[in-house]
Amino acid sequence: MLPAAIDALTAELGRTGNASSLHAAGRAARRTVEESRERLAAALGAHPSEVVLTAGGTEADNLAVKGLFWARAAADPARRRILVSAVEHHAVLDPAHWLAASQGAEVVHLPVDREGRVDLASLATELRSSHERVALVSVMWANNEVGTVQPIAEVVALAGRYGIPVHADAVQAVGAVPVDFAASGLDALTLSGHKVGGPLGVAALLARRGLDLTPVLHGGGQERGVRSGTVDTPAARSFAVAVETAARARPDVAPRIAALRDDLVRRVRAAVPDAVLRGPDPLRPGAAPTDRLPGNAHLTFPGCEGDSLLFLLDSAGVQCSTGSACRAGVPQPSHVLLAMGVDEREARGALRFSLGHTSTAADVDALLDVLPEAVTRARAAGLASAAVAGRAARR
Ligand code: PLP
């Protein structure tokens, strides 16, 4: 967490008062919540009334997808199609799939190119052929695995021709690339506290004024009736401080982190020449800094299991992630890589290195000190398990 966000959180934790109570402590908490809402709105180019506080990015994504689907289908039962990019986070994909399984929705996965960028021609074709049946479009601002920044302005322009609401999951984008809600033309946008140096368990959905959104949670009617539940005052204040600080620092922090990331990619390529960078190549001549999240480096290492590499690096003090989910104890290749055309075998060797505001050149050195040996050992383990599997298959 950013030090300023820790200070804001700890300053509030000792105070009592429910922001919905009428006594003095409640009114003080309400003031803190409303000031936080104003600060969030100002940092994100939104109006304070457009900020709906939630307890996480997953909840905000669920509210956007289900809330928009229900509201649109209630107004016009023919509107049952949900257009999502194939590389969405599960917090968007799974609510859409749940609506399909239980509420008669039809989910259309928009294809992406080899760098993970949504195919605008497919979106245009879908909208042209079935716009009167489309409830909403949801395309993430930036991908959490491969760091690809999506062409949100073009998506909004295409859907706008037919008056179809667009939601963007900007959990990875806020604080990393410029995000202005009003200028984006989006109808709804998700952001989350713990991705911007704020606390875990607090987030927001920015919902355009006048947007029809059916609540997922029913209860005390907080957050304009869209999201019931006592507002977490300390978290709201800390979240606002984090977003404000991250947005203000971004012009200095993002290029510094991007330069470290570029150094990391260059050195990994030199040390492991067959490693493949996935997502837009920041070292390609003409690459724009806004094509890819500054702190993201995602590579596949042929012949390695990502999980083996992850554990080898972890035991050497480097913490990274594979991006793949585990189902019934079996690692599954990432749906993002598969959608980008990476085959299952290659996708299994994926590792994502994330740099943040505390990352230093020494961190990159530390990774490169241990990576070559980890790759050699992960490859040897992969060959050994392939030999065992081969023997078992022949038996
Ligand atoms: N969307 C994206 C792109 C994410 O990266 C994440 C978290 O990693 C989420 C949604 C979920 O947010 P939260 O962890 O706040 O529920």
Image: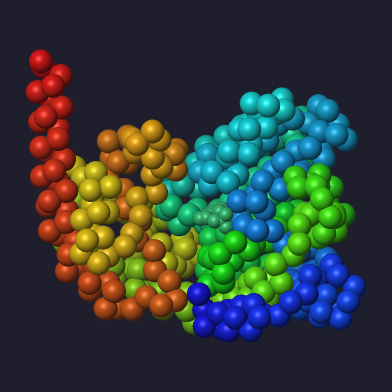
On screen, residue 242 above or below 391: below
On screen, residue 101 above or below 43: above
Q: x, y percentage for residue 167?
A: 69, 50
The residue drawn where x is 75% and y is 38% is 69
Q: How is the image coloured?
A: rainbow
Q: x, y percentage for residue 92?
A: 60, 44
Q: Is residue 379 visible?
A: yes
Q: Residue furthest top?
A: 395
Residue nearest the viewer, comparing 110 with 331: 331
Residue 185 in the figure: left or right of residue 116: right
Q: Residue furthest right?
A: 22
Q: Is residue 273 visible?
A: no
Q: x, y percentage for residue 245?
A: 59, 80
Residue nearest the viewer, comparing 103 with 123: 103
Q: Quadrant of ligand 1?
A: bottom right
Q: Quadrant of the C terminus?
A: top left
The residue drawn where x is 12% and y is 25% is 390
On screen, residue 323 above or below 245: above
The residue drawn where x is 71% and y is 80% is 15
Q: How many marks?
A: 0
Quarter of the view holding residue 333: top left
The residue drawn where x is 34% and y is 73% is 260
Q: x, y percentage for residue 91?
A: 58, 46
